[in-house]
Amino acid sequence: MSQWGVHRLSMRGLGRPMAGLALWAVLSASGAMAQTTGNFTAGPSAPPSLNQWLDRLQEASRRRAYIGTFVVSAGSAMSASKIWHVCDGTQQMERIDSLTGTARTTLRKNDEVLTLVPESRVAWAEKREALRPFPDQIKTPGNAIEEHYTLRLLGVERVAGFEADVLHIQPRDALRFGYRVWSEKQTGLTVKMQTLDGQGQVIEQMVFSELQLDAPVKMETLSRQMAKTQGYKILRPQLNKTTAEAQGWRLKQEVPGFVAMSSHTRGDPAAAPGSLPLQWVFSDGLSSVSLFVEPFDAQRHRREGASSMGATHSLTRRLGEYWLTAMGEVPPATLREFAQALERLR
């Protein structure tokens, strides 16, 4: 398997906990909001809009340190991680230790990510532009989330010992999943989240089983831990920022609500356009899709098809002399629309 293929699979395996932990890492009312509204749900007139709630969720971790145990379940599979998170207002750091499966420690400082695998003594050092907190609406041009989702408040429930407002975020079409989000009442921190399919069934769940807010987490301590890589082989994938058009690709038509966020290749930046593996990332502000395009290799690319793991679906397809893998936390029909719209310019 190519380095690109190994990396793609490792991102799929490691990305689930990371996506969830980034989700929790985003959440608390800003100081100004807390001072002016107090209890966020008790507005003087109209209740907060979906975008106001998402702003609250996105700001939650910026002024707060916490330690918690985080559980992800998808079907019969379940994983758990321990997280330490701290933010000084401008920089965020966190450490994530896997408690199930292969031992693994991931340390993140802003967009710099170091993943240590003790068993193999290998460490991946990367800058993950796509590693964004849920929700990502502030980064999405146009901020049109309310054109594609609606909000309903379901009441208050206790999670990990904290009272939380329960939000039901419903899609307006079949191209995206719905969400139920539990937002801790005082801080806004997301303490639980469920991803829902078109029938409203839970296909994936992320929850803090225990949580300590305002925990004694020190950025200096996490920085020292991130610097301790003695005895590890450090792998640094070479990422090159680019555009899909520069690599000879475009979408014949847009997939409603999804905006191109970033694209990059891996390998020699002087290589001819289209000769390097390309990742093209799209988002609607809440969900995302990655298109991986690479030259076709008959030895590795044997079968087209589709698969799923919890909320993450993938689709593989041959496009002439190229091989496409579309992957995202979206319904299969959304990936098919992307695959049908992708075409080679030259």
Image (tube, rainbow, N blue to C red):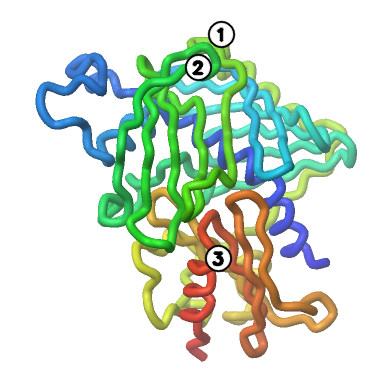
Give the label on residue 65, or none: 2
Q: Residue 216, labelled with which disc?
A: 1
Q: Is residue 165 above or below residue 246?
A: above
Residue annotated with mark 3: 332
Name the element at disc 2: loop
Nearest the camera: 127 or 136? 136
Question: What is the x, y in percent for residue 150?
Answer: 29, 47
Q: Residues within 10 Å of mark 2 (few under 14, many from 20)?
A: many
| Label 2 to label 3: alpha-carbon separation | 37 Å
Q: Is residue 49 above or below residue 5?
A: above
Classify mark 1: residues with Cα within 10 Å, few (<14), some (14-19) or many (20+).
few
* Residue found 59% across the figure and 67% down from its top: 326
Question: How would you rate the neighbour count of disc 3 (Cα within 10 Å): few for under 14, some for 14-19, many for 20 or more?
Answer: many
Determine contact: label 1, label 3, CB under 8 Å: no
Task: Tell me if label 1 and label 2 are in contact, CB under 8 Å.
Answer: yes
What amino acid type is highlighted by mark number 1? Pro
Alpha carbon separation for disc pair 1 and 3: 43 Å
Q: Quadrant of residue 106?
A: top right
* Mark found first going from the N terminus, 1 or 2: 2
Q: CA distance from mark 1 to mark 2?
A: 7 Å
Residue visible at 32% across and 51% down in the picture? 149
Task: Nearest to the eye among marks 1 and 3: give it.
Answer: 3
Q: Is residue 109 above or below residue 315?
A: above
Q: In this image, 276 relative to 283: left or right?
A: right
Q: Earlier in the sequence, mark 1 or mark 3?
A: 1
Where disc 3 sits, the SS reads helix
Q: Quadrant of residue 276?
A: bottom right
